[in-house]
Amino acid sequence: MEKIKMIGEPLPNMPWQDKPKDIDAPVWRYSENPIIKRNPVKNVSRIFNSAVMPYEDGFVGVFRGEQTNGIPHIYFGKSSDGINWNIESEKIQFKDKDGNLFMPRYAYDPRLVKIDEAYYIMWCQDFYGAAIGIAKTNDFKSFTRLENPFLPFNRNAILFPRKVNGNFMMLSRPSDSEHTPFGDIFISESRDGEYWGRHRHVMSVTDNWWEKKKIGAGAAPIETDKGWLLFYHGVVDTCNGYVYSIGAAILDKDNPSIVLHRCSKYILTPEKWYEETGFVPNVCFPCAALYDSATGRIAVYYGCADTYVGIAFTTIEEIYSFILENDQTGESEREIGIR
Ligand code: BMA
């Protein structure tokens, strides 16, 4: 197998467990999952679909908190080990550029990305229906909301962690405002982070049962010397509702609308009690990944059954060889797409 290397800082303090001997799959769960349990914060009944990243000596995170009034908002948290989290009991207070409070009516499924010295949070919010919200912070103390990047309806937006060819790049998944029975991943570019265009198609649903209904980007893409590693979610509609699994693909480094490799098999699907049982059963919903470029270790953070947060581990070598062994990238994915 060709060697592959992740590009980025070493992260020796990231959460990690070696692969158990009896596991054959390329991804294995943290033995103490779920790491965030029910009623984690005052007035918040469930935390799930949340994103984390390294910060100073430890880690920070933006958490989807389902308030006891049923309205989701985003909460900030800190951790020294990436496993035990201290989550603030007051939701993030977003401000406009003039410093006035500028809260979305609701906010969910946050992602977190660092570009140069700034941190960006993207989420889904109400903008005459489900749409993308975005904010910027330099210190995780004040959070400035930016212009909404896209028209409604849209979900699952994630910036790339650096500009590509001088432009910000953002994946997203155009949707409806309900439980969207369709959905492909698209990419858009921006010179200044405010005006978005050059929209291109990235990936469609396939005939593989686990990603037949819709797909959506999960964690911020990880840069490697072979392209961008993307963890995403794939959904199948069953007699008992949607089932969310995790998939993986490699996008072209200089033109990420091109899919180089795409794994026909899921890499994680609901199997444990905390993934199969909860507010919405059978959901594994990835929103972030920590990685150590020195060892090749990766920890994927994923929402479990719309109720908990879990971690699953892999290494860049394991996941890359699994993607290549099960590669089913079609010609249409290697093209730029219809324009
Ligand atoms: C999607 C989003 C996710 C959720 C999933 C399963 O539409 O709302 O937040 O995890 O449904 O309920």
Image (cartoon, rainbow, N blue to C red):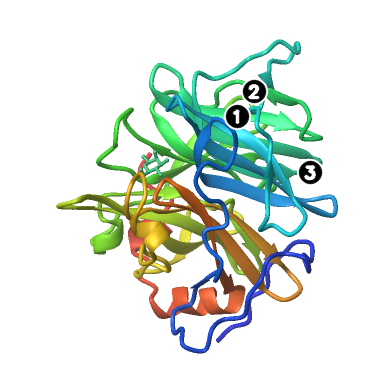
Outermost residue toward the right? 57
Give the percent coordinates (x, y) of residue 137: 75, 32
Residue nearest the viewer, comparing 47 with 241: 47
Residue nearest the viewer, comparing 284 with 124: 284
- From the image, tell me which residue sits under label 2: 146
Whether tag 3 and tag 2 are in contact, CB under 8 A, the answer is no
Give the percent coordinates (x, y) of residue 46: 49, 41
- From the image, tell me which residue sits under label 3: 116
In percent of the image, x 81 and y 41: which residue is there? 117
* Above or below, comparing residue 335 to residue 173 in the picture: below
Please name the amino acid that badge 3 sits on.
Answer: Asp
Q: CA distance from mark 1 to mark 3?
A: 17 Å
Q: How many circles with numbers are drawn on the protein?
A: 3
Please name the amino acid that badge 2 sits on.
Answer: Leu
Residue 290 visible in this rendered orientation of the protein: yes
- From the image, tell me which residue sits under label 1: 134
Badge 2 or badge 1: first in the primary sequence: 1
Q: CA distance from mark 3 to mark 2?
A: 17 Å
Q: Quadrant of residue 98?
A: top right
Mark 3 element type: loop
Give the percent coordinates (x, y) of residue 84: 68, 55
Mark 2 element type: loop
